[in-house]
Amino acid sequence: MRHGKKNNHLSRQTGHRKSMLANMACSLIEHKRINTTVAKAKALKQFVEPLITKSKEDTTHNRRVVFAYLRNKYGVTELFREVAAKVGDRPGGYTRIIKVGNRLGDNADMAMIELVDFNEIYNGGKKEEKKAKSRRGGKAKKAEAAPVVEAAAPVVEEAPEAPETSSEETSEVSE
């Protein structure tokens, strides 16, 4: 029976497992998505989500707690600056695990784990549509002012015609 055994040991000793999860979490924070096995992705999700929750409140204590887990000051800085700004209003569920098939070498189940708010395919299109609707009113006002600018354009086109005739005359003289 496995009563009270919450975390997956991943066939590693404690020190190796903690170092591996810290490195994977730093890579996830830096690159916003990584490919790994399904078991490691599930373990990483349990490891990194509480750290992202702590990053929502930028205090010295929270930075020190997160640094104790990640052990990388660049990862901590990236987490508190960029990631926390994007996930500030999200109540949880900061990562997504997508199964991508089996690895060729040993047929292990592979998965891609990514930060949800940094996926432009799912999130980017919805937000841009809302912005586009609010901008349409401003484009109509600019379109009314545009014909005035176009009326001045033909006057400018007539001026270059005179040098063209002079260039034709010079070419006839050179022959």
Image: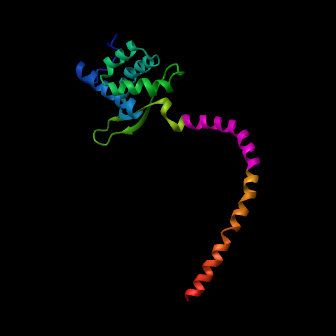
What is the total number of numbered labels drawn onto the structure image? 0
Say left or right for 96 vs 131: left
Say left or right for 9 vs 166: left
Q: Residue at x 63, y 78 (%)?
A: 166
Nearest to the observer: residue 24 or residue 127: 127
Nearest to the observer: residue 148 or residue 46: 148
Position above or below: 116 against 149: above
Q: Position of residue 156 (x, y in %)?
A: 69, 63
Name the chief secondary structure element in magenta. Answer: helix
**Outermost residue toward the top in this view:** 4
Quarter of the figure with residue 89: top right
Quarter of the figure with residue 62: top left
**Where is the C terminus found, in terms of image quarters?**
bottom right
Q: Position of residue 126 (x, y in %)?
A: 60, 35
Position above or below: 152 against 102: below
Q: Position of residue 77 (x, y in %)?
A: 38, 25
**Outermost residue toward the bottom in this view:** 175
Is residue 39 among the parts visible in the rendering? no
Nearest to the observer: residue 152 or residue 136: 152
Position above or below: 158 against 133: below
Q: Residue at x 23, y 23 (%)?
A: 16
Residue 131 magenta = yes
Colouring of the image: rainbow
Is residue 4 among the parts visible in the rendering? yes
Residue 68 magenta = no
Quarter of the figure with residue 12: top left
**Where is the N terminus found, in terms of image quarters?**
top left
Nearest to the observer: residue 147 or residue 62: 147
Say left or right for 132 vs 22: right
Position above or below: 162 against 41: below
Please report the bounds of the magenta region as a residue range.
123-145
Q: Residue at x 41, y 38 (%)?
A: 100
